[in-house]
Image (cartoon, grey):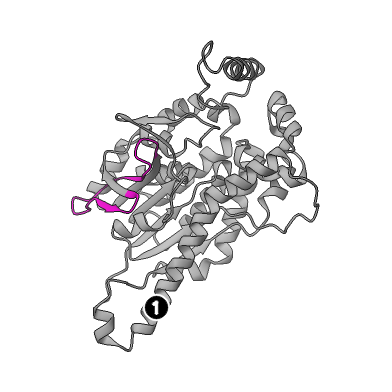
Amino acid sequence: MKEQAKVGLVLAGGGARAAYQAGVLLAISHILPDPRKNPFPVICGTSAGAINATGLACAAEDFRVAAGHLAQLWRQIRIADVYQSDMLYFLKTFLHFGVSIASAGRIWPNPKSFLDNAPLRDYLARVVTFSGIDRAIDAGALHALALTASCFNSGQSVTFFDGAPEVGEWTRQMRIGVREKIGLDHLMASSALPLIFPAARVGDRFFCDGAVRQMAPLSPALHLGAQKLFVVGLASHRSSVRDGGYPSPAQVFGHLLNSIFADSMASDMERLIRVNHTVSLLGGHGDLAAQTPLKRVEVFLLNPSASLEDIARKHVHLFPPVLRFILHGTGATRRRGLSLATYLLFEPGYCRDLISLGYKDALKQKAEILNFLEL
């Protein structure tokens, strides 16, 4: 009997957009023949995807429970659970920026970020049971978990992983894999988007969001032993905006976030497709095939089938008043700047719509997903 291929789950980053992944995983848990068994022995995540990956790994001994718990957290999350957004905070922040710039940092040191995500650290400390990772590994329900962050000190993309004893570290050009016990510091490091959130410290080094400088987001899963990849991306499906007006600050920043979170994944997918094509061409030439380390890797990619901007437009009123006022001033509540809102709108109404979209998208491909998972 043919041994079942080890499937790696790759969860991309994208702020509040990651609620979509919870919907996909919930649907998969509902279509599995045995919903308790984790179909993804290798789980990798970056940024908000790292939070989802860790939540899934902590309860990997019962996949349906893990997916259900993850979806429930996203249905209930609020902006106040992720970052400060009250009037007093923004008054202090704007004053801080003004004094710091005017005095060249002499009167008041440079601010660490525009938003303070200390509430996220407290929230994750309450809802994530990290001890479940070791239990899942020991029980054989999980082979490896990996989170990626970008190191300010070395400039490297660092993948922190924990897994079975045979899983080893790796070193590549500007990217490394380091075995460590995954904890709260690693989650905060992977999701510390530069300028928006402060840098996070792990040991004696400072890190920012893992999507920054992550040129090969698919590679950690392969290093950890995955033979097939199931990728849940967060690239929004939308048509081009035909309005030729000068881009608003929100449109510019949303464009930058899209390039950070979506472009490297798309490029790595293209590389994988080319490698698979090359391997297929070598299939009839045994001598040549034996001389290359390249292997064909089957991949299943799932991205939102609808515009996340259109969904966000219905919920921008959920932003706290002062933040809504600021975002409106930057153009983030208007059509051309809505991309920024899709990353910051951690509110139940918006997140529930994304969960519903992810659930429906996965169910539409039920047969293809089960075939890919060899179930």
Q: Is 84 left or right of 217, judged from the image as shown?
A: right
Residue projecting furthest to the bottom: 284
Residue 99 is situated, as x and y percent measured from the top left of the image, at: 60, 14
Residue 352 is situated, as x and y percent measured from the top left of the image, at: 62, 44
Q: Which residue is found at the position 53% from the left and 48% from the top?
A: 260
Q: Is residue 37 above or below residue 338?
A: below
Residue 243 is situated, as x and y percent measured from the top left of the image, at: 81, 52
Query: Quarter of the image holding residue 124?
Result: top left
Q: Which residue is found at the position 47% from the left and 46% from the top?
A: 211
Q: Which residues are magenta?
A: 151-175
Query: Quarter of the image holding residue 226?
Result: bottom left
Q: Is 171 left or right of 166, judged from the image as shown?
A: right
Q: Quadrant of the C terminus?
A: bottom left
Residue holding disc 1: 278
- Amino acid found under the numbered disc labelled 1: Thr
**Residue closest to the eye, 281 or 373:** 281
